[in-house]
Amino acid sequence: MKKFDKERLLLAVAGPVIALVVAVALTSVVLIASGKNPIEPYSIMFEQATFSDIQVLIINQASLYYIAALAVAIGFRMNLFNIGVDGQYQLAAMMAAVVGAHVALPAALQVPLLILTAVFTGAFWAGIAGVLKVTRGVSEVVATIMLNAIATSVIAYLWLPSVFGVKVGNNNTTGEMHKSGWVPGFSMGEAGEIYGLVILAVVLGIGYWVVLNRTRFGFDLRASGASESAASASGVDPKRMVLTAMLVSGGMAGLAGLPILLGDTHTYSLNFPTGIGFLGIGIALLGRNSPVGIAFAALLWAWLDKASPELDFHGYDKEIAVIMQGLIVIAVVVSYEAVREWGLRRQQRRVGAELAAGHVLGAANNTEKEVAGR
Amino acid sequence: MTAVELAGITKRFPGVVANHDIHLSVRKGTVHALVGENGAGKSTLMKILYGMQKPDEGTIAVDGEQVTFSSPADAIVRGIGMVHQHFMLADNLTVLENVVLGSEKLYGIGAKARRKIAEISERYGLGVRPDVLVENLGVADRQRVEILKVLYRGARILILDEPTAVLVPQEVDALFDNLRELKSEGLSVIFISHKLGEVLSVADDITVIRRGTTVGTAVPAETTPRQLAELMVGSELPTPETAESTVTDQPVIQVKGLTAFASGGASLGDLAEPTPDSGLVAEDTAETAGAVKRVLDDVTFTIHAGEVMGIAGVEGNGQTELIDALIGLKRADSGSVTFLGEDITAWATRKRREQGIGYIPEDRHRHGLLLEAPLWENRILGHVTEKPNAKGVWLDIKGAQEDTKRIVKEYDVRTPGIDVTAASLSGGNQQKLIVGREMSHNPKFLIAAHPTRGVDVGAQAQIWDQIRAARREGLAVLLISADLDELIGLSDTLRVIYNGRLVADADPATITPEELGSAMTGAASGHLENEELAAQAELEEHAETPADAPEDEAR
């Protein structure tokens, strides 16, 4: 069956490659239309990727993207659209920062405590949408968007000095966390420090793959995504599955802000990165919900983010990178669907052809019966 | 003069042949009925005629002229219009707005369009009021709006897809009056249905389609419902002879007083809500307005080890609900199910399957397979907690793959390997995989819904063999099938379901498909005997099949 494995690899790679090529081509069109050199910006950005300090920035940024995209991908795998990752990770980071500033345990307990705080906060926030969907049939898309807005307000409330807030100049913060909750990074000398929790991102990626592909729960989840009716006939309780997937997705989302919180900022302030949850949607799409694909996509996104500021110094606008990210997402959606259908048809034809040629498994008891797929 | 002539139409979908060498000739100014069981290929054929799908082979001629359609727009230009089974109207627009929508160029959107609508409505006696909001209309009125919409676009040939499925008997009569008006004006109507009584009362010609091909034509005046039923279900198949009885006295599944009420969908219970603006419908359904329809009504039976109990019935009479209640997909509203002496009414689907209830679903694409997953993952589906698919909470992928190979071999699933997707297999091979999978877990009770539907004759015999072999070992089977020969041949006992009730029982050793077929229309009840039934058959010449819940949207 080697043939079909090669086939699958081809199909897996074809989608993103087509999307990227299309996106680059269209971006070049934009550049030409605005009277700029359509090649040079890419070479500038590629050059940036060779600098070690930029590489560290890319890896650090990618770790946030990666976790957020995994959270989105869990939902996608069962046809749930968790748009609320953004609110979930911000609120979770905030709660972790607050706990980190007010509880002082030894590091061996403090860090797990902060991680659990983030997981439960994210899961709780996503769980609201899950419960609404299961009990009242509210679309999780609508509910999670609303919860994003509510999360913003809750965060603003928690920032009040009378609640957990600490004013530092004009900035709202949650106060500095106790040192025991800081996670040391990997020093790269001059280039800077890679967040310690990049390891967490890697572990989550492996865990995601193992759970989805090697456990009964993962099978049920994938079955629900592939065909809700077939899954429930197979014995999956659809409501429980929706709720579980939302909780897991939210818990994962809660972790998305931790690498930077525990590794760098040590407080949740106005400067804390926002919008990662939304970027995670595009990254999960580009990465085809696969942990390896998402890793590449997250690195690509982080590279576009971190290499583009240099463009400003060469007379280009760094927004080119944003245009490109947008185009990639659109191209990805189209190309994946096209490749998927093409692959399915191709396989049906191949199976038909192989059967016609008599390559049949268990050929011992074949008689003159029907031939499939012709 | 022929209005439409279809010749040698063949349409293949990946894995299945939906239409094969179909011939259909519709005379001008007539109502031509196209009858056949669900899944026989009627809808595909009409989609081809309406330009929604292109045939792989064959020709279409309209008014003697050869045509090819690449979209419904082409068909409309040629004067072909389709009234879909599921209405395509915007609720929040008025009748006028709905009619002109998309055809604004024809007569504008104002006074001219209104005049045209009034004219059509007058001419064919449709009684459509242009300024009523569609949401205030009942089903029958909506259907007339759909018909008017098609006529407004200049159709001379109308395709009506199962138009009576959602109507109550009085509305059906009104519709038929409309159809007679249409044909007296020289229009042609193609009427798709599987309700034989109606077909005989309205059609001028009948074409019967079975297993994707046209098997015959009939003239209503010279045809009885029984003959038509025979044509429809076919009786040339190898009848599986009933071997010596293996029925024991050990009950495996006992169902007591199972009752379920209609919920959602276009069942009569829902349609009966008050519709102040449409006098006709409100009157017609007044009698049903108070009560919610029972889709399962006090169903009680016992199946013993080694017994195959067949359930005959026109589709949509409660079979789906019965299956759902037994496998645990949808709970019945009252009643109990006992499995090997244990009350399982409250069990979840997974527990039922783990404990030995096998399930061959009605619609294998929706309920039996993950089409885009490889065969070995499909082998896991439904049995993810059981050996050889799992070890604890972990999947046993090696075990599942090995066992898939075994199933492929033992059940003669024709595939180049177990890594191909289920979608790339033909329907018959998909079904063999499902049967193999369910049998591999040694079920004690098997729900077999249309186990050989869409399966070629060779695979059919094989699946029958599997069921018979398991029955010898003490398996209890609930067999639901539209194939009456299959029912009679495989079953030890037979029941007839009508309007959610088990209304009759019969001895498969003595009953014939024709007798069973007429009992399915609800005319006979109690124990069916040969002579008795023959006498009754005379009385029910015009018996109507139930006008209730719409059929499943399969394929």
Image (tube, coloured by chain):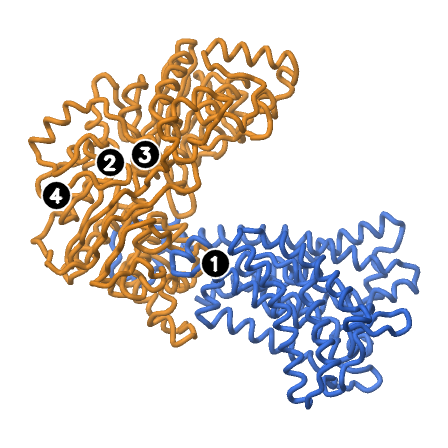
- In front: label 3 or label 1: 1
Determine whether the residue tagged by mark 1 lies in a helix, strand or loop.
helix
**N-term-proximal mark, 3 vs 2:** 3
Q: CA distance from mark 1 to mark 4?
A: 42 Å
Read off the chain for label 2: B
Q: What amino acid does circle 3 point to?
A: Thr
Disc 2 target residue: B233
Q: Is residue A25 above or below residue A269?
A: above
Disc 4 target residue: B508
Q: Quadrant of the N terminus of chain B?
A: top left
- In front: label 4 or label 2: 4
Crowding at dot 1, Cα within 10 Å, few <14 / some 14-19 / many 20+, comes out as some
Asked if the residue under mark 2 is in contact with the one under mark 3, i.e. CB atoms within 8 Å, the reply is no
Q: What amino acid does circle 1 point to?
A: Lys
Q: From the viewer's perspective, is B226 left or right of A117?
A: left
**N-term-proximal mark, 4 vs 2:** 2
Residue B491 percent coordinates (x, y): 16, 48
**N-term-proximal mark, 3 vs 4:** 3
Image colour for chain B is: orange
- In front: label 3 or label 4: 4
Residue shown at the point (33%, 61%) measured from the top left: B347
Disc 3 target residue: B213
Q: What amino acid does circle 2 point to?
A: Val
Disc 1 target residue: A239
Read off the chain for label 4: B
